[in-house]
Image: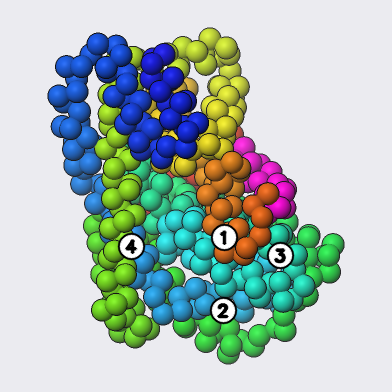
Amino acid sequence: MIWLGTAFLFTMLIGMPIAFVLGFSALTYFVMTGQTQFLLVLPQRMLAGMDLFVLLAIPLFVLAGSIMDVGGLTRRLIGFANSIVGRFRGGLSLTAVWGCFLFGGVSGSAAADAAAIGTVMVPDMTRQGYDVDYSAALIAVSSLMAPLVPPSIAMIIYGALSGTSISQLLIAGLAPGILLAIALSIYAVWVARVRNYPKSEPQSAAEIARGFWKAIPVMLLPIIIVVGIRGGIFTATEAAAIAAVYALLVATFVYRAMSLRFLKDAFVSTAIITSAIYFLIAIANVAGFIFAIEQLPQKAVALLTGISDNPYVILLMVNLILLVMGMFLDTIGVLILTVPALMAIGNTLGMEPVHLGVMVVFNVLVGFVTPPVGLCLFVISGVTGRPMEKVAVKALPMIGIALIVLGLITVFPQISLFLPEILGAR
């Protein structure tokens, strides 16, 4: 493990992408430990890691999100959210929070959420007197809801790596996502009252109905996914295929925004995103092979249980480790490195695998808004042209709120589990 750790740290420090970090570290491990015979089976293990039916959901969900983002989708969702909450003090900030929640049900990506909502909302909020750094920070943290609500690429990857039911994971993320949205809304209202931010004119019932009618084809997408999975009509992978077909039909015949150019752009974007994810998953299978050789999961369990036998203390240590890793690695990188050990720890503590999965995914998502990586901070800074460090400072109280929600999810498993139990997801 010394050679593996040394190669990993060196390549990380020189700024190598995480997929190549893991690949180079694995190669160094096998060569320097004299286990070069295993190099012959690495291509087979990489292909086996990608050759999973459940992973087909990733490109299909990405394609559905890309297609649905055609033709003013973001404006429709934001318009509907603003018609509901715009009348309250700081209504635009509430629109940003719930706009992120609604758009997350289409994109499944925090970075896409931050870019789409930030591009539309930050200029509007700035014109109405909102602090631009606060606006950017609010949208960056609110975008964390996207990977919690269906469709969620992070949940699919965790399920594939751990063998946990992806259908249950997709539904289990809904309640934590709503809880985070409510907590951020309370904070946004408090800030708006303290700073006397404006509120919009109340819209009539007819205007609200028109906004709802325009947005309903988009909002039906996550509903179709949840209801279809819950009703046993289709699996999570089949749901992804149906979502892609539905998105194509809506963009073509309802919004009349589809063209060959848009379709080409959607397919190219999907191919680029999917190939990067699949390559990471292939390398993850090699890393998992090394972890099995070195018995890393068993050692991690022994280390943590040797420090304390209190399950809450162990969970606290696990969360702290994940938070630190999330500051330097992206979500997929953290999942690749930690899932084998986390599953062993969860089994030792008797944790429900779905609860563990939601806790882990939520935890690593916080890394999206914590420097030095902070993907959503980079995205929103690029969209607004503001220095990342200034946005990060404004995000600190909201990161604290996200950590409180994480604590609640960790201590009270039913927050994550009651929806899968009620809906009977399999």
23 vs 342, nearest the viewer: 23
Residue marked by disc 2: 79
Tell me what residue is drawn at x 28 percent, y 32 percent: 285
Residue 397 drawn in magenta: yes
Q: CA distance from mark 4 to mark 2?
A: 26 Å
Instruction: Give me the disc on residue 382.
Output: 1
Residue of label 3: 132
Relative side of 353 to 23, left or right: right
Q: Position of residue 350 (x, y in %)?
A: 44, 24
Q: Residues within 10 Å of mark 1 (few under 14, many from 20)?
A: some
Query: Looking at numbered disc 3 in the image, what kind of residue is underneath it?
Result: Val
> Is 364 above or below relative to 307?
below
Which kind of residue does numbered mark 4 sit on? Answer: Ser
Tell which of 114 and 219 is nearer to you: 114
At numbered mark 1, what does the secondary structure look like: helix, strand or loop? helix
Q: 124 left or right of 148?
A: right
- Quarter holding the N terminus? top left
Frontmost residue, 262 versus 316: 262
